[in-house]
Amino acid sequence: MYVDNENFDKWMEKLSKKLNEIGQNLQSLINTDKVLDENDRLLDNQDLAFLLKVSFRTLQRYRASGKLPYFTISHKTYYRAADIRAFVQENADSKTYERFKKENQLDKQTSAKHGG
């Protein structure tokens, strides 16, 4: 295939525009961590089940009873870290909660969130 200079320049210009568009799309994906507050992570069912050492069914019961706030995106369930902390604090005895805070370094996250 023969490409003369004029067609080559047009082709390169199209290619450059497309690469810039792809770069912008990638940049927007990279910056998704700025969508939420930096201290408010999202956890999915697998993350939370592992963290709380419970089954998926137990998480389902907590959701159904209204004890554990959640939301779904594309049929996948997510939990906000702040909601999980509140849930554990309300439902665990003080010793268990203190152990949970220590294991998950919640003191550092909470103090960083409140500027302390």
Image (cartoon, rainbow, N blue to C red):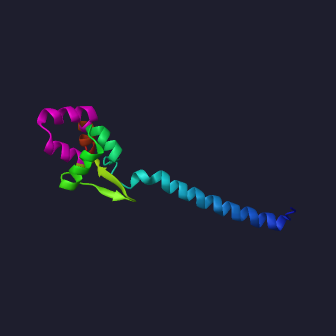
Give the x, y percent position of residue 34: 40, 53
Residue 32 falls left or right of residue 55:
right
**Per the image, is 93 magenta?**
yes
Residue positioned most to the front: 57
Residue 40 falls left or right of residue 6:
left
Q: What stretch is highlighted in magenta?
A: 84-106
| Residue found 54% across the figure and 54% down from its top | 26
Q: Is the magenta stretch mostly helix, strand or loop?
A: helix
Residue 114 in view in this figure: no
- For the C terminus, the image quarter is top left
Give the x, y percent position of residue 33: 41, 50
- For the N terminus, the image quarter is bottom right
Give the x, y percent position of residue 89: 16, 42
Above or below, 13 against 88 in this view is below
Residue 69 falls left or right of residue 19:
left
Residue positioned most to the left: 93
Residue 6 in view in this figure: yes
Considering depth in this image, is 52 or 84 the residue closer to the camera?
52
Considering depth in this image, is 43 or 10 the residue closer to the camera?
43
Give the x, y percent position of residue 60: 26, 50
| Residue found 30% across the figure and 43% down from its top | 48
